[in-house]
Amino acid sequence: MYLLYLDESGSPADPNQRFFVMAGICVFERQTHWVDQHLGSIAKRFNPTYPEMIELHGAPMRSGADGWKSFPASDRAQAVVDALHLLSNNQLRIKVFGAVIEKAQMPVGTDMVKAAFEAIAAEFDGYLASRFHNKQEQARGLVILDNADYERHIQSLSHTFKHVGHAGGKLRNFAEVPLFIDSKASRLIQLADLVAYWIFRRYEAGDHRGFGHISPAILTYQGAANGLKEFVSATTSATLKNPGPQSHPFPPPSTP
């Protein structure tokens, strides 16, 4: 079974934010232990005795909120880099899925959560189908999200997409409706949070530092990054192709 851990960054209702992002990581069930172990070792740098008390959380780690202020910015940045660097570990075989919505490009009244989840669910379902067609692997999937106010909404959408259909057909490879868990208890949800946050930073703030570690893991078909669905303007796309120099660049990964 393939597990897709998702989180969101940005708020659909915040008029001060131009973008809303839902994104995360897809991991084969037997790899979750190793991802957890790697992330746990990063958390242990900040609390060697009780590493489970440390939640790797994108926005607080960057800003210093929620207790992160007591740690040097350089150490926080190194932790972000080392966590995102796991995406390039070939043995873990992590794939990134996501949807980026530029609010101004959507019709008034658009359900941003529905649009983002529909795009990701359809792509994830297609990926699972491709595992069977290309490798004769009868893959099933399960979506796991951080606890959120829209839990029932997402579960209802998943049921509808499976039994009634969505814009591209029906979901045929989901093992169950999405599950919701506390991010404090799941390192993999925490990695999904980091992925969603640093994708959001790329679009919202022109901060490309984290995206460079994320982009190689985005699911691709025939060279196209189909795992990350963009609902953005042509101007936004053009701007992203030529990012300017980044202030306070990230350090290189501390481990191979």
Image: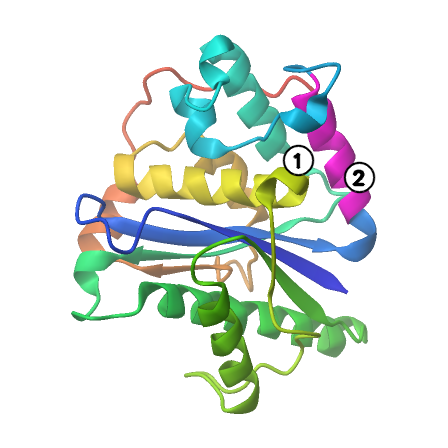
The answer to whether residue 256 is visible is no
User: Please, is residue 107 above or below residue 202 in the view?
Assistant: below
Q: Residue at x 55, y 81 (%)?
A: 159
Q: Quadrant of residue 104?
A: bottom left
Q: Write down the residue under mark 1.
A: 86
In the rendered image, which quarter contains the N terminus?
bottom right
On screen, residue 200 versus residue 185, left or right, reads left
Q: Position of residue 106 (x, y in %)?
A: 22, 66
- Look at the numbered disc 2 and give the secondary structure of its residue: helix
Query: Dot 2: few (<14), some (14–19), or many (≥20) neighbours within 10 Å?
Result: few
Give the camera-side residue of 117 and 122.
Answer: 117
The magenta stretch spans residue 41: yes
Of mark 2 and mark 1, the one earlier in the sequence is 2
Q: Residue at x 67, y 15 (%)?
A: 47
Q: Write down the residue under mark 2.
A: 34
Q: Give the residue type at disc 1.
A: Leu
Q: Magenta part of the protein: which range?
A: 32-44
